[in-house]
């Protein structure tokens, strides 16, 4: 009888009773690398006895074997650490102390690391026939934005494209793995935590109501995977290809992110307190001119009278040069200050020979960079994870977490009440800071500078940004429970059974409001939304292991998965506030409710067999049979097979000791199929009973009128033959280790073809009566290459240095859209620049209009004289180069101006041609330096913000009004480097008024031509630069009882190299729910941060 | 034995968890959408069609019409290029598809079928009037239209504009016949009909008025249509009580579209146009303060509001007795009966508080057309009349450009039906209204 633990039912309190001294065995020693450096966190354990511990920061370990179990037998003692080759030695357990030191050889390829391969299965890295990228806890802690686990994936693996919506608190992030495979819904991977799928929805409050703003208004939206406390995460495995992900069948077409949380280890109880403080600044503010004031035609406009409104074309900064001494304001920067985040985590873990536990609590409080108190995100989380060995064959475990998140947000984006929309349009001489009129106490903005009494519900045209920032009323409060119980049962020596029953439940309370006089809805508006989500997952697998000869080992796994997802969204739009406050539904005059309920079930079976031959050939075969309630009734079950082969040819060459020039070599071949389920209720044909749109300008009519109930046929036709989308992917690769494993290189090529891709296939309304029809009709391909190179020139005890590069290239193409040329994504963008999937180009590309160009064989009556003009013939009339023109040259009509081409086409492709990540770590003694850079190339972005600010004359660039200008020489040369046509070379802009008229019309953001504002969005970002020091001196232990104290200072997003003229090439108008990731319309900026972190461990 | 019992227990667990869920994948909320109705009544469908039709006539198209005819000014954002005739195949905002889908022809035909099955000839007649109203407007704006092969799948071909108008006349004739039915099974829309309360006589008069309007719209190429328009106008809506207009409660989703656009959604995009304001001012038109709230001068910069036409509950006209009277007047004039024309013009004037007069000849026609231009404020028919008559003889807003002669088919329709030509291959004007070289008074037509 020695140590004993007891769970008090109800309290989850763990009492650890002190060990009793008896005839026990104490095993202790030190674990170091060949270079003599201690290996902290190395696991030392007795094989088959569930006894062991972890080494401390100095590499020392010590644990006790109870007398009852130390019976003089000989067992194997193993020391293991990821990144090193494990060592074992036989020991005989007698009473008394045993001292054993271990020296482990470096094995940077992590070949023996256990890799979670999904649905309860695992393997070791050496045996994998496909790519699984792993991000471990140290990298997650170092990552750029610790608040959101998705951000920790940025730059860590090739073709894992992470984008955050903005630097605002609560901004969501999206991750796209190996390109977009789908064109309806999202391209987000499946997130699985400790074997249990969790919800990663990204739901914007006003998206749920088909409200008046086009997409991209409202506030930031958080992707729900951000509810996981990154400090609880041990490692993340990214299943990229279909071969790796096929075990998740029809939920895995966009890849799978497997998150494993930390657990306790046998041994003394460990405590860790981490405290991180971050200071955030916006990276860039819009460069605005401070010289010309409000007005038109160079004539100032003074709106001095009470109740005067700035209307018509007078609302831009096209007035006179401001008299010297006029105070002006930087409207781009005055609305921002320094943001601050405090992140504190306390964890406790440990265990005895039969029970382990991990208990943690985290508190994150983020104050954003926008002025005012309404820009924050707080998260509190708790986790308890424990295991207990009931008997030698049965282990039970539980893992429970609760998170509480609360956010306050500011209206943003495409929204007349949005922060930057109002701020950046304001003329320089208007003082936005006085957002409340001192006389009336009412909201004033530059277009309504002297509010009249009684104008409480009158629009201000654009809100004063300070009014926006200080208006409370956009909130989200969420409580979420994720937990599971699991059983590990080994009834026979060759048979292992694992069972997990998990639940993920959250309730998200949302409030979004516009106060009275807000331009978005001057009489005031309240949106209340409740999202209630429940996912229950049952996963049962049995694995049989057999070794037929010493050289042939096989496993066979059978599994069953049952999953139920239930979601309830209830929202009510209350319009017209009765009293100015509170923002509550009963304080509004009329209400429109909206409810969306759904229930989806999955019933699946899977089988997997593996064979290990002669320690060099590893074969995996598997199949998953999926039944989904969302599949059409005509065929309810579908199969997703996979196969992979790994051959370690260096073992065949007799180089099993991993030494020499070619120290390791592996060939990988893999094939797999994955799927994606149809939208819930896509099989149903029904009526709609809510809103019928009147036009794209937001004016609308309900189907019911004056209490008379009305319905109309839904615009989308259901389809009871819907099948899952299916991705078939081939993956080939080579992994090498060179120079005694000082260098490793991994090369991968993949070719993924997704067929039966579901779309709301546009249909001829005249032929069918429907606008769209759900159909398995599109074909999308993603082909690419991935290269990972790591070099470790120095691995000495005092100095070590490691450099890593990853490169990913993906070519996304939409092969077919069932005959359609393109499919527009509803609400993703604007009529001038709308997201789409376009055949022959790709998913998420932006469509709009361009100017007429030469070489397109266009015949357009551009001058409206009733005669069709042959454009190419007119291009030959260029005065500078008569008779010739360059294909793609901008056509310049007589007068010197280009003309809009009425044909809608692809104008921007935000999918990167390639991306790269660079990382380096250098360690000098206890000092560690780290750097991480991120490269994205071949991206084009529609910069709608710039177009609008040209129109309003506030952009710095509009100082061009002081010069004369010619297309092709002085203006738009980056977009249109060559010009032709009768007006080529003609001075189009002789006066400031010429510039003004051009920007007020076709040349500005309210013109029809979106292509002129498409820019190169490629960038190189220095994501992180850090230095950390680890104190582990003896006095620390003696005086303060800490084993180590780590101090880390870091800067993130320190520098961006880009040609992009907007705030940030990464900022994205929508969140992860958007398939289009390259539209900029008054997007909020990204932030640059200074990070200070302390970690106290004992 | 113990080993085996474990294995059996395990196998039983696997089997039971599978077998216990026979209906795990279907039934209840798994198969039936809990959010959208699948069983509906005829009156439900009628109200949906009613809403969609109001949207067709009173939303974006009426504002486009008013911009092209310079009743309003496109002053901001997307309305500036539209005011300068920069139209493309997205400019209709989905209106072309709305003719057929969701509350359009698809539901009209459903209602006709269900009414026929129920022997509800009054509802059938009403649905046929709705069909004429919607398809006729489509023919006005797009010309050739998918109609004969509509809603039958495949790749339907375009029916020539004049044929569409003929079919519209035929369906309105059927409507008139069905509305005359006295079958006991007739139920009609009843109170769901927010304008007429299901009154068959009022629907019949509307059908005649619509016939008159669509005859008039073909008269530029079929001069005989004036006589037909005259016949129908005499049977059409005669009093204000017979006006067909939207009825707005003022609640969310139930308000005047013009109000929503100018006040709630796109403040400042549409502003009063000097041209119409000056015209009404010069004529001392009593409706000026109804249309406009103050003096109009776009260079003043102060925002001028519209009058009560953009109040949330102000009804928006679709077919007024006034329009019917002016059709009657014009058709009488064009068929040589100036006395009848003057009588109708004066009847119209009396109804609108305008002193009567005794014009004759060209002056009489000018008065009729001027009154109609003013009467059709922010109304889809204003632009259609302009295309036919070149009246008023507007100066285009952009030098060297013509006022648009038609709208492009929606991009959606063009990409899903190979029989729809690309935007650049579509005609600039429709079959029924070739460009006028001169207006009715011998002046060169400036905008066509």
Image: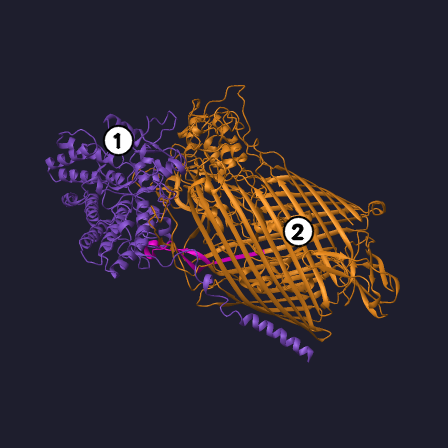
Chain colours: A orange, B purple
Estimate how packed mark 2 is, as few (under 14), some (14 to 19) or many (20 or more) residues with alpha carbons within 10 Å.
many
Q: At numbered mark 2, what does the secondary structure look like: helix, strand or loop?
A: strand
The magenta stretch spans which residues? A758-784
Residue drawn at x 55%, y 27% is A329
Please report, as a chain letter, where disc 2 is located. Answer: A
Main secondary structure type of the part rendered in magenta: strand
Q: Nearer the viewer, mark 1 or mark 2?
A: 2
- Can you see residue A1029? yes
Instruction: Measuring from the top left, give residue A156's x and y in whole percent.
Output: 65, 51
Identify the residue position indicated by label 1 in the image: B287
- Magenta stretch: residue A761 in it? yes
Query: Which of the two residues, A409 or A190, is positioned nearer the viewer here?
Result: A409
Residue topped by disc 2:
A382
Q: Position of residue B268 (x, y in %)?
A: 39, 33
Residue situated in front as seen by the camera: B353 or B130: B353
| Chain holding disc 1 | B
């Amino acid at each position: 009888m020695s140590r004993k633990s007891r769970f008090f039912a109800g309290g989850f309190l763990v009492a650890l009773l002190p060990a009793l001294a008896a005839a026990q065995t104490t095993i202790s020693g030190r674990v170091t690398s060949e270079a003599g450096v201690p290996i902290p966190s190395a696991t030392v354990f007795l094989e088959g006895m569930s006894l062991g511990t972890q080494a401390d920061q100095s590499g020392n370990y010590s644990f006790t074997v109870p007398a009852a179990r130390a019976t003089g037998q000989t067992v194997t003692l193993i020391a293991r650490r990821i990144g090193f080759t494990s060592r074992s030695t036989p020991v005989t357990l007698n009473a008394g102390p045993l001292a054993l030191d271990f020296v482990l050889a470096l094995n940077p390829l992590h070949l023996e690391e256990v890799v979670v391969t999904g649905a309860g299965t695992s393997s070791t890295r050496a045996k994998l026939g496909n790519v699984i990228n792993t991000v471990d806890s140290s990298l997650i802690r170092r990552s750029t934005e610790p608040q959101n686990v998705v951000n920790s994936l940025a730059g860590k693996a090739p073709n894992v494209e992470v984008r955050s919506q903005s630097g605002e608190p609560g901004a969501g992030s999206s991750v796209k793995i190996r390109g977009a495979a789908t064109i309806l819904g999202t391209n987000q991977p499946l997130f699985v935590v400790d074997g249990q799928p969790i919800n990663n929805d990204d739901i914007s409050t006003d998206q749920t109501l088909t409200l008046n703003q086009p997409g991209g208004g409202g506030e930031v939206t958080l992707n729900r995977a951000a509810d996981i406390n990154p400090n609880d995460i041990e490692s993340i495995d990214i299943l990229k290809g279909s071969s790796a992900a096929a075990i998740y069948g029809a939920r895995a077409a966009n890849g799978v992110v497997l998150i494993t949380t930390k657990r306790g280890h046998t041994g003394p109880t460990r405590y860790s307190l981490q405290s991180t403080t971050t200071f955030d600044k916006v990276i860039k503010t819009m460069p605005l001119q401070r010289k010309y004031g409000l007005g038109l035609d160079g004539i100032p406009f003074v709106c001095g009278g009470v109740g005067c409104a700035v209307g018509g074309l007078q609302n831009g900064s096209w007035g006179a040069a401001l008299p010297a001494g006029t105070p002006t304001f930087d409207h781009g920067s005055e609305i921002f200050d320094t943001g601050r985040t405090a992140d504190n985590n306390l964890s406790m873990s440990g265990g005895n020979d039969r029970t382990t536990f991990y208990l943690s609590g985290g508190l994150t409080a983020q104050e954003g960079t926008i002025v005012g108190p309404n820009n924050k995100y707080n998260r509190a989380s708790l986790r308890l994870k424990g295991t207990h060995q009931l008997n030698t064959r049965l282990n039970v475990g539980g893992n429970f977490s609760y998170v509480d998140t609360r956010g306050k947000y500011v209206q943003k984006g495409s929204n007349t009440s949005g922060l930057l929309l109002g701020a950046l349009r304001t003329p320089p001489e208007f003082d936005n800071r006085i957002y409340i009129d001192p006389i009336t106490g009412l909201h004033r903005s530059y277009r309504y500078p002297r509010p009249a009494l009684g104008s409480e519900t009158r629009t201000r045209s654009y809100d004063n940004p300070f009014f926006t920032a200080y208006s409370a009323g956009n909130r989200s409060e969420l409580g979420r429970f994720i937990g599971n119980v699991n059983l590990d049962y080994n009834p026979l020596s060759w048979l292992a059974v694992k069972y997990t029953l998990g639940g993920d439940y959250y309730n998200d309370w949302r409030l979004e409001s516009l106060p009275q006089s807000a331009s978005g809805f001057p009489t005031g508006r309240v949106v209340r939304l409740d999202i209630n989500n429940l996912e229950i997952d049952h996963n049962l697998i049995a694995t049989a292991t057999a070794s037929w000869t010493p050289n042939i080992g096989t496993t066979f796994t059978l599994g069953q998965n049952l999953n139920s997802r239930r979601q309830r969204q209830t929202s009510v739009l209350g319009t017209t506030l009765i009293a100015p406050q509170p923002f509550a539904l009963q304080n509004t005059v009329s209400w429109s409710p909206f409810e969306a309920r759904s229930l989806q079930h999955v019933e699946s079976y899977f089988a997997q067999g593996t064979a290990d031959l002669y320690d060099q050939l590893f074969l995996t075969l598997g199949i998953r049979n999926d039944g989904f309630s969302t599949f059409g009734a005509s065929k309810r079950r579908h199969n997703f097979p996979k196969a992979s082969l790994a051959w370690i040819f260096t073992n065949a060459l007799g180089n099993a000791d991993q030494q020499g020039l070619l120290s390791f070599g592996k060939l990988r071949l893999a094939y797999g199929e994955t799927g994606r389920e149809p939208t819930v209720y896509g099989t149903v044909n029904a009526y709609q009973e809510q809103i019928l749109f009147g036009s794209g300008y937001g004016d609308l009519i309900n189907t019911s009128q004056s209490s008379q109930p009305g319905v109309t046929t839904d615009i989308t036709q259901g389809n009871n033959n819907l099948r899952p989308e299916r991705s078939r992917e081939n993956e080939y690769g080579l992994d090498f280790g060179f120079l005694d494993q000082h260098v490793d290189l991994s090369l991968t090529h993949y070719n993924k073809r997704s067929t039966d891709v579901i779309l709301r296939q546009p249909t001829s309304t005249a032929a069918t009566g429907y606008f769209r029809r759900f159909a398995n009709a599109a074909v999308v391909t993603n082909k690419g290459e991935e290269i990972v190179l790591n070099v470790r020139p120095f691995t000495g005890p005092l100095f070590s240095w490691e450099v890593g590069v990853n490169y990913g290239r993906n070519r996304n193409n939409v092969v077919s859209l069932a005959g359609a040329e393109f499919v527009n994504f509803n609400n993703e963008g604007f009529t001038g620049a709308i997201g789409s999937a376009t055949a022959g180009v790709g998913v998420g590309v932006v469509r709009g209009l361009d100017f007429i160009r030469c070489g397109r064989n266009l015949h357009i009556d551009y001058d409206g004289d009733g005669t069709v003009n042959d454009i190419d013939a007119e291009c030959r009339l260029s005065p500078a180069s008569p008779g010739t023109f360059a294909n793609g040259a901008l056509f310049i009509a007589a007068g010197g101006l280009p003309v809009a081409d009425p044909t809608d086409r692809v104008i921007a492709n935000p999918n990167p041609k390639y991306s790269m990540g660079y990382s380096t770590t250098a360690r000098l003694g206890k000092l560690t330096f780290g750097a991480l850079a991120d490269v994205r190339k071949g991206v084009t972005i529609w910069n709608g913000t710039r177009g609008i600010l040209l129109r309003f004359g506030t952009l710095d660039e509009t100082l061009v009004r002081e010069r004369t200008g010619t297309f092709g020489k002085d203006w738009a040369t980056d977009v249109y480097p060559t010009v032709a046509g009768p007006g080529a070379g003609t001075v189009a802009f002789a006066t400031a008024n010429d510039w003004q008229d051009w920007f007020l019309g076709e040349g500005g953001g309210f013109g029809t031509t979106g292509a002129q504002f498409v820019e190169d969005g490629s960038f190189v970002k220095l994501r992180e630069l850090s230095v950390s020091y680890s104190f582990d001196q003896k006095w620390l232990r003696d005086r303060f009882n800490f084993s180590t104290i780590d101090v880390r200072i870091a800067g993130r997003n320190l520098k961006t190299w880009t040609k992009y003229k907007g705030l940030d090439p990464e900022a994205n108008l929508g969140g992860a729910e958007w398939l289009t990731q390259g539209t900029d319309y008054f997007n909020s900026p990204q932030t640059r941060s200074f990070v200070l972190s302390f970690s106290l461990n004992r | 034995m113990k080993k085996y019992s474990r294995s059996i227990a395990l196998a039983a667990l696997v089997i039971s968890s599978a077998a216990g869920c026979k209906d795990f994948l279907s039934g209840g909320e798994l198969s039936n959408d809990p959010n959208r109705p699948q069983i509906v009544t005829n009156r439900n469908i009628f109200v949906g069609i009613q809403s969609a039709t109001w949207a067709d006539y009173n939303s974006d198209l009426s504002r486009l019409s008013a911009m092209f005819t310079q009743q309003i000014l496109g002053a901001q954002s997307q309305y500036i290029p539209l005011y300068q005739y920069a139209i493309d195949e997205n400019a209709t905002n989905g209106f072309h598809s709305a003719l057929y889908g969701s509350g359009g022809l698809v539901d009209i035909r459903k209602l006709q079928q269900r009414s026929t099955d129920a022997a509800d000839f009054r509802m059938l007649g009403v649905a046929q009037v709705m069909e004429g109203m919607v398809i006729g407007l489509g023919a006005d704006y797009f010309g050739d239209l998918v109609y004969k092969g509509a809603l039958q799948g495949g790749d339907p071909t375009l029916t020539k504009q004049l044929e569409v108008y003929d079919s519209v006349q035929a369906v309105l004739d059927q409507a008139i016949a069905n509305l005359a039915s006295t079958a006991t099974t007739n139920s009609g829309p009843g109170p769901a009909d927010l304008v007429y309360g299901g009154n068959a006589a009022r629907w019949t008069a509307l059908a005649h008025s619509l016939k008159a309007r669509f005859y008039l719209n073909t008269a530029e190429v079929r001069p005989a249509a004036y006589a037909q328009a005259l016949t129908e106008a005499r049977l059409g809506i005669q009093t204000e009580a017979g006006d067909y207009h939207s009825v707005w409660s003022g609640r969310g989703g139930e308000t005047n579209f013009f109000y929503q656009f100018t006040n709630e959604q796109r403040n400042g995009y549409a502003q009063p146009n000097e041209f119409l304001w000056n015209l009404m001012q010069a004529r001392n038109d009593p409706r000026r303060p109804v249309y406009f709230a103050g003096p109009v001068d776009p260079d003043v910069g102060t925002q001028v509001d519209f009058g009560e036409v953009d109040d949330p509950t102000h009804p928006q006209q679709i077919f007024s007795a006034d329009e019917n009277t002016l059709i009657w007047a014009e058709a009488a004039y064009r068929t040589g009966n100036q006395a009848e024309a003057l009588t109708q013009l004066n009847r119209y004037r009396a109804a609108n508080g305008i002193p009567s007069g005794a014009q004759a000849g060209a002056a009489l026609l000018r008065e009729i057309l001027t009154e109609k231009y003013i009467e059709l404020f922010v109304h889809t028919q204003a632009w259609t009349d302009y295309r036919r008559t070149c009246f008023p003889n507007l100066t285009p807003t952009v030098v060297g450009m013509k006022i648009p002669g038609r709208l492009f088919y929606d991009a959606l329709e063009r990409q899903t039906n190979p029989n729809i030509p690309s935007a650049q291959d579509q005609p600039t004007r429709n079959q029924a209204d070739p460009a006028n070289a001169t207006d009715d008074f011998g002046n060169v037509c400036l905008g066509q």
